[in-house]
Amino acid sequence: MNKFEQLGLNESLLLAIKDLGFENPSEVQEKAIPVLLEQNTDLVALAQTGTGKTAAFGFPLIQKINVEDRSTQALILSPTRELCLQITNEIKLYSKYIKGLNTVAVYGGASITDQARDIRRGAQVIVATPGRMQDMINRGLVNIKNISICILDEADEMLNMGFYDDIVSILSDTPDDKNTWLFSATMPAEVARIAKKFMKDPAEVTVGHKNSGSKTVSHEFYLVNARDRYEALKRLADSNPDIFSVVFCRTKRDTQSVAEKLIEDGYSAAALHGDLSQAQRDGVMKSFRGRQIQMLVATDVAARGIDVENITHVVNYQLPDEIETYNHRSGRTGRAGKTGTSIVIITKSELRKISSIERIIQQKFQEKTIPSGIEICEIQLLHLANKIKDTEIDHEIDNYLPAINEVLDGLTKEELIKKMVSVEFNRFIAYYKKNRDLSGSNSGERSERSTSPREFKSGDDVRYFINIGSRDDFDWMQLKDFIKETLDLGRDDVFKVDVKEGFSFFNTDGEHMTKVMETLNGFDMNGRRINVEISKNEGGGGSRNSPRRDHNGRGGRSDRGSGGGGGFRGRSDSGSRDSSGGGRNFTKRDSSAPASERKRTSSSDEAPRRERKSSDGESKGFFEKAKRSRRSE
Ligand code: ADP
Ligand code: MG
C-alpha cells in the first residue's frame, strides 16, 4: 500500500496519481487530504509555492463531487488567468478516470459568453479569477448559491492584487453551510481577516517554517550602478550559457523594454505582462515551456504561480515594491527537489532591502560580483569545448568530408582545434575586450589602480580559474575549504569563490599567488589533475587585457557566418529545441553571435555587410542550407 492509498483516496484518483508519476504525497498533501476527506470542515493551509497545494485540495475536492449532479458544486478562486488555466488543467488530469466530471476555467480576456455556455452545460467545478467571477455573478451568468466547497488558492496573492472586495462579494453569494479551504504561502493580516470573517473553526495545516523560502533555492545579489542594470543582466546570461530563467521587472513598461532589448541583442527572450493579448500570452508561455525562450521577462502579476519545470534562475532585475513578493518570485525556481538560484541585481541605495528579505526568507544572501569579460570568455570557451564534445555527428556531413579535408589540409590537430574554437570565441573576446568591468560601489577606484597583470603584490586581489566545479561535487563553501586546507591558508584568505559546473573561480591576495600556482597546479584529486590559471587581476582592469590568450583578432571574424546556432549562449540540445515550431515570433535562435556584439561591431570599422556577403557568397552546401532552413522557421 503506498502512501496515497493510506490517505483514503479512491481508486480512480489513485490510478490518475499513478499516471502522473507521483510516488508519495508531499507534506501538505499528507496533512490536508485526510482531514478534508474525513470531515466537512473549513481549512487554512500555509505552504510555500511548489509544495503541491493544487493536489492537496484537488484530490479531496474531486472525491467529494457528485458527478451524477451537473450543478456547480465547487468554486476555486485563484489570482491570475495563468494559474486558473494551470489549476483547471491539473484538475482535469486528476479526474481523468472519472466520467462526467466537468471543470471550467473562468477568467478575463476571453469570451464571457463562451465561458457561461460551458458552465450551463454542466460544470461541477469552476476555477475563476475574482474579477471575472464577480462580473459573471453581476450578469447572472452563473449560480454559486448551492456550492458546497469554495477554495481560495494563493489567497495572499489575491489580496495583494487588490481582490479583497471581489472576494468578499463573491463569498457572500455562496451558502453559509459550505466549506471554505484557504491555501496560501503567507498569512498577512488581510488573509487572516478573510479567514476570520468567512470561516468557522478551520482546521490548520502548516508546512515548514512560516514564510521561509525553499531551501533548494540559493540567493545571490550583485551590486551595480543603476545605469549598468541591463549590462549586468546580459553578463549574467552570458556567464550562464544554459540559463532558463524568469526575469522580474516592476512595471509592464520595463518588462517590455528589457525583453525587447534582449531580443534585439540576440537572446531568446520574451515579455509576459498584462498588456499582451491572450493569444500572445499563450504563445509566450508555450514557447517558454518548450524552452524556445531562455529568458522570460515578466511582471509579478503575469508570472504569479507559474509552474514551469527546471527553471535555473530567477532574476530580480528590480526588486519588488512589496518585499513579501520576493518569496513568490524565487519560488519559481528550485521546484520539485531541484536546485535553483535567485539573483538580485541591486544598486547601493536599495542595499538595505537585502537584510529585510533575509529576515523574511530566513536565509542569507551571497554577495557576488558581475563576471568580468574575461571570466565570461572563459566560461563560454569551456562551454563551447563541451558542446563540441557532446555534439552528435550528423552523418550527412560525411559526403562533404573530402571537400572539407581539402580545405583544411595541412593543419595540425592543435591548429584545427584552436581555429574551430576561435570561430566562436574571437567574437566574444572582441566584445568583452571593449567593455569595462561592472561593479557597483567602487568601479572608479578600481580602474584607477593599474598594476600590470603579471605582477601581483601583497594587497592585490588575484583571481584564479580552476578546472573543478559542481560536477566534482563542490559547492562554493566546499571548494573554499578544499583550497584553504590544501594550501594551509587562513579563514578569509580565499574569497569570491564562484563554482560553475566544470570549473570555478576564486580570489586570494597577491601574496599567496605563488603558493596557489605551485601547490594546486598538477595536484592530483582522486586521479584528476588540477589545473589553475590566473584569471585576471582584480586590481588592474583585466577586461582590457587578455594575458593568457593568443587570439588572432583580425582573422577570425569573417568566419562568423559558419558558426551556426548561437553557440555561445548555447541552448544545450539545440537540435531538438530548434526544430520545434512554437514561439517563432519571440525567439531569435539563429543569431550566430551575441547580437550585443554584433550591434557594437556594426558601428566599428568592420562592416557586418561584408561578413554576410562572404558567408552567403562562398559557403554552399550542407552547412549553409541547414542554417537557412533554421532561420526561415
Ligand atoms: P503549489 O501550488 O504549492 O505552488 P503545485 O501544486 O503547483 O504547487 O505543485 C508543484 C509541482 O509539484 C507540480 O509540478 C506538481 O505536478 C508537482 N507535484 C505535486 N504533488 C506531487 C507529488 N506528490 N509528487 C511529485 N510531484 C508532485
Ligand atoms: Mg499553487
Image (cartoon, rainbow, N blue to C red):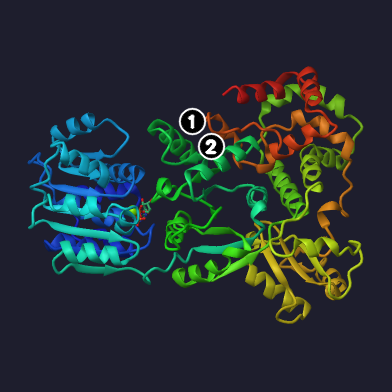
Q: Residue at x 88, y 55 (%)?
A: 547
Q: Is residue 16 left or right of residue 462?
A: left
Horizontal side of 534 relative to 333 (left or right) equals: right
Query: Which one is nearer the viewer's eye here, 196 or 177?
Result: 196
In the image, which disc is placed on residue 292? 2
Looking at the picture, how far across and down is residue 210, in whole percent?
36, 70
Disc 1 secondary structure class:
loop
- Residue 393 place in picture, x, y as percent: 67, 33
In the displayed structure, does residue 211 sit left or right of residue 526? Answer: left
Residue 615 horizontal/vertical position (percent): 78, 23
Please say if 529 is above or below 422. below
- On the image, the x and y values in percent for residue 299 come to 46, 47
Local secondary structure at mark 2: loop
Q: Mark 1: which amino acid?
A: Gly
> Earlier along the polypeptide chain: callout 1 or callout 2?
2
Q: Is residue 537 visible?
A: no
Inspect the image, locate mark 2, and give the three-letter code of the amino acid beneath it. Gln
Compared with residue 352, is residue 583 higher up or lower down, i.e. above or below? above
Quadrant in which residue 199 is drawn:
bottom left
Residue 588, quarter of the rendered image: top right
Closer to the camera in the image, 438 or 364? 438
Residue marked by disc 1 = 582
Quarter of the displayed picture in which ligand 1 can be seen:
bottom left
